[in-house]
Amino acid sequence: MTLRGPRLPTTRLTRILLIAAMIAMPMVSGFAAPAVASAPGAGVTAPAAPEPRPVSERYAATGIHAVTAVAVPGYQVFHPADIAVSPDRHPVVTFGNGSYATYVQYEELLRHLASWGFVVVVADSSVTGDGTEILAAARYILAQNDNPESVFHDRIDVAHVAAVGHSQGAGGSINASTASGGLITSTAVLDLPDPWWASRPVDVFDVTRLTGPVFYLTGSDDPVSTAIPQAAFHAVSPGPAARGRLLGVGHNWPSDGGGFRGYLTAWLRFTLTGDADAARAFVGPAPELLADPRWDGTAVKGW
């Protein structure tokens, strides 16, 4: 990802974030933030006999669906190949590319998510920080649910939509969620830039305006998404939230999502489908994320 030069944090939101971080983080350098588990979510029941493999490992594996990719004007769409004959309604994931990137940089990850039953749509844009393209992509797919000529007719779960993005697209996903009027019900951000990286006023995001659950994922070696602001984003998010830093990972990673893929998929299954097995990574008396030695700075709250 190519980034413009940083600006000093002068906004009121930045001051709030930094103050929250001082409260939330007792250590600044090489920190391992205290892990705080939350109560189980309402209506989520843990499986009686979970598989022995970790949640993250199971959801990093390919899902049960073959995947079809479709290019339509303005968008790339990845969906379960059996969508026209399956009785299921599929949640939507709208994805925001990072700066100067296209869907190609993320294609394996997007296909992976579709294999788990999601309809994944990504706008043909590499300037996504204001969130308009990300939100428009979600609305495009939702409109197809009402189109008798579309393969998506009556196959979309219109009540469950997630915004996911990387870098500039992560900020755009926050903006898409807060501007969606409740249409977007879950958010997950990969390498969300620290506040001073927003080089255009329209790219400034405000996590305190989120109304649904949010998952902050970043790499421990990422100079763009650093420890103090990431902890602060989590601290000031008003609803359910999770966060973690994947050890040894920088700002860019393989197109299949690398070490992020398992927990990201589990998050989407949990928050969009109520998957009780996936929920074990984030809720209950011992959320898996909090004990995973590959991650630090982990925390969950709000359930």
Image (cartoon, rainbow, N blue to C red):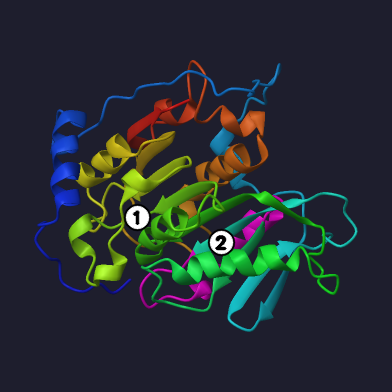
Q: Position of residue 103 (x, y in %)?
A: 52, 73
Disc 1 residue crowd, few under 14, some 14–19, many 20+, Cα 10 Å: many
Q: Which amino acid, mark 1? A: Asp
Res 243 visible: yes
Q: Which amino acid, mark 2? A: Thr
- Taking the view exactly as shown, the residue that stands out farthest to the front is 181
Disc 2 residue crowd, few under 14, some 14–19, many 20+, Cα 10 Å: many
Element class at badge 2: strand
Q: Residue at x 57, y 69 (%)?
A: 137
| Quadrant hosting residue 173 | bottom left
Q: Is residue 84 magenta?
A: no
Count the labels in the image.
2
Q: Residue at x 61, y 30 (%)?
A: 53
Magenta stretch bounds: 96-118
Res 109 visible: no
Q: Position of residue 301 (x, y in %)?
A: 40, 28
Q: Is residue 222 above or below residue 102?
A: above
Q: Quadrant of the N terminus?
A: bottom left
Q: Residue at x 53, y 20 (%)?
A: 40
Q: Is residue 5 above or below residue 58?
A: below
Q: Which mark is residue 191?
A: 1
Q: Nearer the viewer, mark 1 or mark 2?
A: 2
Between the C-alphas of marks 1 and 2, the distance is 17 Å
Residue highlighted by disc 2? 94
Q: Residue at x 58, y 39 (%)?
A: 271
